Image (cartoon, rainbow, N blue to C red):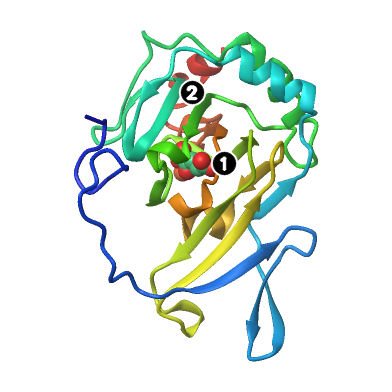
Amino acid sequence: TCACKGCRRCIVCENHFDQNQLKHSEMLYVPSLKKCVCYQGHHLVGFDFPGVSVFQDFISAPEERELIRRNSNRWKDSQSGRRKQDYGPKVNFKKKKVKLSSFTGLPKYIDFIVERIRSLEGLDNFATVEQCNLEYDPVRGASIDPHYDDAWLWGERLLSLNLLSDSFKTLDIDSGEFGLNEFEVKVPLCRRSLVMLSGDARYKWKHSIQRKDITSKRLCCTFRELSPEFSSGGTQEHIGRSLLD
Ligand SMILES: O=C(O)CCC(=O)C(=O)O
Ligand SMILES: [Fe+2]
């Protein structure tokens, strides 16, 4: 058995795979250009693509080894073949309730990451309130379906630290924007890089990790900040403050 529910699936529970998936137009995001590129006929064309920032080699190889060693236990089975470790407030997103009593804060071993995030340009005010680790193992066919992250509690900037192997994050948009029905941008996730989604890449585009892009075990640590509602001046500021203290 596995932990999948509803339309989620992993190799364990999957007994049928939809072969009739629509063809996407695929583009590659090029971090150094902050553009995505694709071929139109024989021409390589580029489009501005704001909202994705990539910090290559955000941690060193020894730091990566130490992080992996520190979070080697307390994994729980999750959806779509993933395993999960969640350090953050207990939240019921449907009922919009935050449970403060069970919140123990972030693990100590992550302090240096939290600090390093704040040393990045424009991120000096990033107050990490949640860390969620996900493990993707190709043996289980692990993936994450296209989704938007919650916007009620979590703030605009989503940070993910990519460990153990290289992969891709896939961004897609449903509507007829750009004059295409289906449109997909592959964002390279280099091992030890930190990747930020914000703005349109956070709110307009869905993100996912496709099974085919997990070729060897991958670990992702996602860091989140609070939304304006829970931040200074917001109506739920008091809850936000008690989470950050
Ligand atoms: O594994 C990743 O890079 C994405 C994880 C994610 O989208 C999420 O936890 O909401
Ligand atoms: Fe997400």
The residue located at (61%, 12%) in the rendering is 70
Q: Is mark 2 within 8 Å of ligand 1?
A: no
Q: Is residue 210 at all visible to an observer of this figure?
A: no
The residue located at (43%, 44%) in the rendering is 149
| Residue assigned mark 2 | 240
- Res 21 quadrant in image: bottom left
The residue located at (63%, 91%) in the rendering is 41
Q: How crowded is mark 1: few (under 14 residues within 10 Å), some or many (20 or more)?
A: some
Q: Identity of the amino acid at label 1?
A: Leu
What SS does tag 1 mark? strand
Q: Is mark 1 within 8 Å of ligand 2?
A: yes
Quarter holding the C terminus is top right
| Residue assigned mark 1 | 158
- Res 64 quadrant in image: top right
Quarter holding the N terminus is top left
The residue located at (48%, 25%) in the rendering is 237
Q: Is residue 78 at all visible to an observer of this figure?
A: yes
With respect to residue 22, does 16 lie above or below? above
Give whichever of 42, 146 is nearer the camera. 42
Along the polypeptide, which appears first: circle 1 or circle 2? 1
Give x and y (percent) for residue 119. Answer: 80, 31
Q: Is residue 95 left or right of residue 214?
A: left
Give x and y (percent) for residue 188. Answer: 65, 54
- Res 153 quadrant in image: top left
Give whichever of 236, 43 is nearer the camera. 43
